[in-house]
Amino acid sequence: MLKIYNTLTRSKTTFIPIAPPKVGLYVCGMTVYDYCHLGHARVMVVFDIVQRWLRASGYQLTYVRNITDIDDKIIKRAAENGESIAALTGRFIHAMDEDAAALGIEKPDAEPRATDYIEDMQALIGRLQANGLAYEASGGDVNFSVRKFPGYGRLSGKSLEDLRAGERVEVDSAKQDPLDFVLWKRAKEDEPFWKSPWGAGRPGWHIECSAMSTHLLGEHFDIHGGGQDLQFPHHENEIAQSEGALPAGHPRHFVNVWMHNGFVRVDNEKMSKSLGNFFTVREVLKRYDPEVVRFFIARAHYRSPLNYSDQHLDDARGALTRLYTALKGFPVTATPPDWNSPHAARFRDSLDDDFNTPEAMAALFDMAGELNRTRSPELAAQLRALGGLLGLLGRDGDAFLKTVAGSTDAGAQTPEQIEDLIAQRSAAKKAKNFAEADTIRKQLADAGVILEDSPQGTTWRRA
RNA sequence: GGCGCGGUAGCAAAGCGGUUAUGCAGAGGACUGCAAAUCCUCGGAGGGCGGUUCGACUCCGCCCCGCGCCUCCA
């Protein structure tokens, strides 16, 4: 029985699909005006694991992750770069696809782009207007009237009064209430626009997710996810829009389960664009193997903060190395998990408990220990199968150990050179010339290569 | 100010009212020409003060510290 922590109820509850075995999952994806940073990587990895586990649990999943390809930042960046919006977003969608693929993220079933759903958004805004929840402000924008939507603030645990008390936004005088948010933005000079009943303009940010999720998953679906920072106001507004657009008397229940993943931090502070303390995925991947990065993310619980540092990545690499060391010498094949085995059962129970990946990984390490003792091919295949459910351990063990080096990369020697030196050393050993053998070992060690002697001969790996 | 989350051994990170988390690092041993890997053994924990309990890291209260949201942000 899968249990998920639901932000809406602030409790972990058994997951019951609306129409089993079908499950709908919508995750807020990227605004494509720059490269993905590690925070984006975390969302992608976290929900990739959620997605894999839901499917492994037998659900017929429809996984949707949207792409925001029109908004103020995109317009601004395109203007700065002197390129078209389409060129800019196209470039960064491509980059995102590359980063995601490197991290072993499976493609969602749908990746809708905001600009393909302008009509849906307009229809939604029209219905909100008809329901008396939206109004045209003096400047030409169409706003959502939060005070007319009962229950506004339920998801984020905020009341309109508290929000007003803490108000620190510049008040837009065209708004009836400072907390009202824009649904449709009147286009200014030189801004891209779409025609609409409210004049030329573009959609506000929040409306796109209401339009796309409803279009692809229905007006009531199972799970909606995203980063913690989207809880308010983005997801709060999404609920207001989606439920507010329904006809009077229609049951209002947009999403059953809301999931929010924790932030990536740097020096104990949230990694964010505005703080400038972010690392892009591609920067990090220049220095660390993608599977190490994925392992690093999966090693923490998805709702906990995750501190980024080289030391932590090195640590993750060391841990992953232990797993691959145990798998060395076994084929890459996996067998379907035997859920009756204690290890697999522990793994399953862990993921069923709000996707507790750290606990699931502990099971993997216990298996590795047992594998080192027994060298059982069946166990190796099981370890691979379970690792595969996390998107890990899909590579040949020896290949991993030979290619994945630490941050203090010293891979100066090619495999051919290394094999050559190993042959020289073997000859020296045979002649009992241990001084020379040790010199060669030292030489390779300095180049980041560790030699391991065994009765079957000498093997090597990167330090 | 309002709302919320967290403080676990050198580092990272889980579960759990009483029984080994796990990984890295550390100590001793086995193995090795020397190593590495592996195996065996071990040390080391739960911010502070109270309370509940036969018993609390685990439940409750207070305090201290850190973080987040309340503005675009994954």
Image (cartoon, coloured by chain):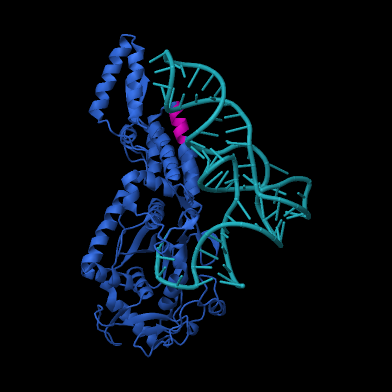
**Location of residue A176 in the rendering, given as x and y in whole percent from the top left corner:** 46, 87
Which image quadrant: the C terminus of chain A? top left
Q: What is the quadrant of residue A130 in the picture?
A: bottom left
**Location of residue B48 in the rendering, given as x and y in whole percent from the top left corner:** 71, 50
Instruction: Establish if A450 lies above or below A133.
Output: above
**Location of residue B11 in the rendering, given as x and y in whole percent from the top left corner:** 53, 43
Task: Name the residue nearer the viewer: A262 or A77.
Answer: A77
Q: Residue at x 36, y 23 (%)?
A: A442
Q: Residue at x 34, y 88 (%)?
A: A140
Q: Main secondary structure of the magenta part?
A: helix
Instruction: Establish if A376 lies above or below A111.
Output: above
Task: Name the residue nearer the viewer: A214 or A362.
Answer: A362
User: Which one of the lettered chains is coloured cyan?
Assistant: B
Total numbered circles: 0
**Location of residue A248 in the rendering, given as x and y in whole percent from the top left corner:** 44, 85
Residue A455 shows in the view: no
Apparent side of residue A224 relative to residue B63 in the rendered image (left or right): left
Residue A282 shows in the view: yes
Magenta residues, as a range? Answer: A367-373
